[in-house]
Image: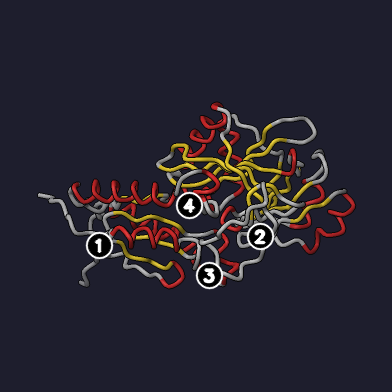
Amino acid sequence: MLTPEPDRPLAIYYEHPDWFRPLFAELDRRGTPYVKLHAASHRYDPGETSCPYAVVLNRMSPSAYLRGHGRAIFYTLQYLGHLRRLGVRVINGEEAWRTEISKAAQLTLLERLGLPYPRARVIQDPAAAPAAAEGLRFPVVVKPNIGGSGAGVRRFDTPAALARAASELDLGLDSTALVQEFIPAEAGRIVRVEVLAGRYLYAIRIYSPGDTFNLCPADVCQSVDGVELERIACPADAPRNALRVEGYTPPADVVAAVERIAAAAGIELGGIEYLIDARDGRLYFYDINALSNFVADAPRVVGFDPFARLADWLEAELAAARRAPAARPAGRAAAFPVAQEV
């Protein structure tokens, strides 16, 4: 008979050295039992039949390759599959991670849900970019399929400019990329909606000074009224990228669409981004993130500490998983018959 295991801790599987310090600090303050699993040095035994963790929170970053940890991106898929076989409660598991590391898959998901997104073509050969852009409205951007923090995104204002650069395009880790219409954002701002437990948590509007594609909310420098924000989630020498931010409440239909996206992607904790086209006022969803970096100085910007809300939820999930009987791993196939020598 399976019995509850009340002592198993929470495990946080992560890669970025700074983004999760506030969460670790909050859990330490509460005395919540947890362990850190650094993705870049992680290993596992596929033959094990139990897991020492009651809950695993997947916080792996798709931009890990920018920090020399690209190998962990695909390894993470294998580990999440292993945890699924063991029946472990995983937050942002395989499905969420597959969505996170494929911009092409994100567009397929948006298409399936009937939600608007900038028109795009998917390519595997840099030389195909000019032909793929035919029929798209310029400017266009070329986005590596596996990105994160705007890495590798390039803008081209004319077909000629794209044709000249095609031979030197870097399509990224999986040699796949989008050629996508560039949408000029109304008032130079995008909206990021955060979800917790798959439900709306808060939203912010981020104002960019130009065509930067790195809109990490943890890197925001100041509020729209010019007040400097304390960026506790970033190293002290992080670049000041002139991003400005304000709290914002999206329309109810947008919130409902965001929650549909999160559910379809298997994302319990993450951020969905959209913008309004400055030319015609149309809304477009353009990025789905299973990695949530809460906004800098959140109490000042949105009125509460999302790390405290996250810790509340994690404690509840941990308590529920500890009460549940330990899961059995998926059954093994019958042993392969070995021929006997005659």
Whole-angstrom CA distance, mark 4 to mark 1, is 22 Å
Dot 1 corresponds to which residue?
52
Dot 4 corresponds to which residue?
97
Which of the two labelled residues, at mark 3 and mark 1, occupies the earlier sequence position?
A: 1
Dot 3 corresponds to which residue?
69
Residue type at mark 3? Answer: His
Disc sitting over residue 151 in the figure:
2
Whole-angstrom CA distance, mark 3 to mark 4, is 16 Å
Which of the two marks, 2 or 4, is nearer to us in this view? 2
Q: Is residue 107 above or below residue 94?
A: above
Which of the two labelled residues, at mark 2 and mark 4, occupies the earlier sequence position?
A: 4
**Percent x, y for residue 58?**
42, 56
Which of the two labelled residues, at mark 4 and mark 1, occupies the earlier sequence position?
A: 1
Q: Nearer the viewer, residue 300 or 44?
A: 300
Count residues near mark 1 (Cα–Cα under 10 Å), then give few for <14, some for 14-19, many for 20+: few
Residue type at mark 4? Answer: Trp
**Percent x, y for residue 22?**
44, 60
- Of the 4 image quadrants, the one containing the C terminus is bottom left
Q: Is residue 35 above or below residue 157?
A: below
